[in-house]
Image (spheres, helix red, strand yellow):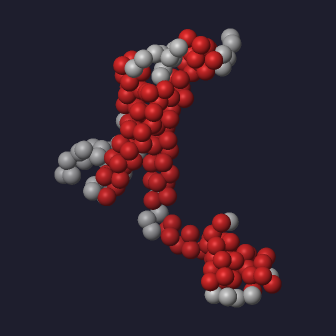
Amino acid sequence: MVLNVVLGRDLIGKVFGSKWPDEKPIQVMRIMTAFVIIVSALLSIDPPALVLDISGSAFLVIICATAPAMVLGIWWDKATKAAAYVTIFVMTFVTGGSWLYAFYVQKSPHWFFLSDPSNKIPTPHQFYWIPISFLLFIVVSLLTQPPKPEIVKKYSLDIRPEY
């Protein structure tokens, strides 16, 4: 929708000076929507699985960066804010970087990024980073000062479901 406005109103109307977007805004937006859909469809054809690979990678980066803090922050009393910050920062770059390395150097994100090019090890979207992110969170939590008891009560114990 934003692209429709940029193309229709801003580019055609303001850059090229046409009065068409002011006179018939709905017609312009419909035409721009069709244009954006056609261009997007053409871009997604080659290679066809790239959209799936990118969405899988994005999901992996989000899980590795935030899942340990969300899960262990509620269910583990020793989880710390420092561990959350370190895990989010480190795992965002590590998982994204390993995916990009596998994609550009090994020509597919479905190979272990450190495997030998002649003997590639298959892996679905570098999933092995998920347990590593939890391990990183636990190690950093154990090495940093534990949270105060009132913080644990407010942000962990009080929001747990009762059985």
Q: Between residues 12 and 106, which one lies in front from this camera angle?
A: 12
Residue 113 makes an appearance in the image: yes
Q: Between residues 120 and 7, which one lies in front from this camera angle?
A: 7
Residue depicted at 45% across the width and 59% down the height: 50
Quarter of the rendering containing residue 29? bottom right
Residue depicted at 68% across the width and 72% down the height: 5
Side of 159 where 120 appears, left or right: left
* Coordinates of residue 111 in the picture (x, y in percent): 31, 47
Q: Between residues 146 and 24, which one lies in front from this camera angle?
A: 146
Q: Is residue 123 above or below residue 3?
A: above
* Coordinates of residue 118 in the picture (x, y in percent): 18, 51
Q: Is residue 122 above or below residue 29?
A: above
* Coordinates of residue 144 in the picture (x, y in percent): 39, 20
Residue depicted at 68% across the width and 66% down the height: 1
Residue 160 makes an appearance in the image: no
* Coordinates of residue 69 in the picture (x, y in percent): 50, 29
Residue depicted at 43% across the width and 65% down the height: 47
